[in-house]
Image: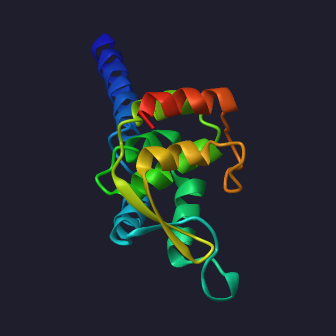
Amino acid sequence: MNKLILTLGLFHWQALLSIGYAQSATELRTSIADTVSIMGEYEFVDMDAIGPGGTATTQLNRFIYLLENATIEELLTLTNHNMRNVRAYAFWSLAIKRHNNIKQVLESKLTDNKLIRCRLNCTNITMPLNRFYLSVLSPESKFMHGTTLTQAEILEFQSKMGK
C-alpha cells in the first residue's frame, strides 16, 4: 500500500513538472509558433492600419493575435527570435501588456542594433531595433498603450546606447 502511494505521489510530481516544463520560456505553443513563422517571412513591422482604406494589414492582424494570445513567457522567448520583426513585435507586446520587467528587458536589448523596416502611415522607415524598443516606450508614442518611460529614463537609456 505504501509503495502504491509513493508511486502515485511520484507520478503526481512528474506530471506537475512536465506541465510546468511545457510552458517554459523556451517552448512555444503550436498556434504561436505557426503565427511567428509566417510573421517572420514578412519584412516589415506594420505599426498601424495601412491597408486599403485604412484597414489592418494581415501582418498587423498577426501582431494583434500574438498580443492577445502569447503568454509573457512566450513573448520573452520571442524577444530573442532570429527574425528582427518578431523581436520587435514581441517587445512591443510586452510593453503593451505592461510587463513588470520591461525596463530590464530593454536594458538587455540595448545592443540589438540590427536594422528593421517599419511601415507607418504608408511610409517606410528604417531604424535600429534598440531605437524601436525605446520609441514604443516613449510617452509621446501614439502606438503605445501600456508601459512608458519618463524623459529622464529615455535619456539614460539613450546614453547607454551610445546615441
Query: Residue 151 is drawn in which quadrant?
Result: top right
- Horizontal side, residue 71 vs residue 150: left or right: left
Residue 141 against residue 39 in the figure, above or below? above
- Report the label total: 0
Q: In which quarter of the image is residue 41?
A: bottom left
Q: Measuring 40% from the left and 44% from the top, which residue is drawn there?
A: 79
Picture coordinates of residue 15 (x, y %)? Answer: 36, 32
Q: Which residue lies furthest to the top in this view?
A: 2
In front of the other: 109 or 16: 109
Residue in the image at 71% along x and 56% along y = 142
Is residue 117 shown to the viewer in this render?
Answer: yes
- Furthest-bottom residue in this view: 52
Residue under the image location 60 percent in, 33 percent down: 154
Left or right relative to 146: residue 157: left
Q: As rendered, which of 142 and 21 lies closer to the eye?
A: 142
Figure quadrant of the N terminus:
top left
Q: Which residue lies furthest to the front in this view?
A: 163
Residue 29: x percent and y percent?
Answer: 40, 53
Q: Where is residue 80 in the image (x, y as percent from the top left)?
A: 34, 44
What kind of colouring is applied to the model shown?
Answer: rainbow
Judge by depth and name the residue closer to the eye, 131 or 63: 131
127 relative to 110, above or below: below
Residue 10: where, in percent of width, then height?
A: 32, 21
Say above or below: 141 vs 49. above
The residue depicted at 44 percent of the width and 44 percent of the height is: 130
Do we see residue 150 in this rendering? Answer: no
Q: In which quarter of the image is the C terminus?
A: top left
Q: Is residue 34 left or right of residue 136?
A: left
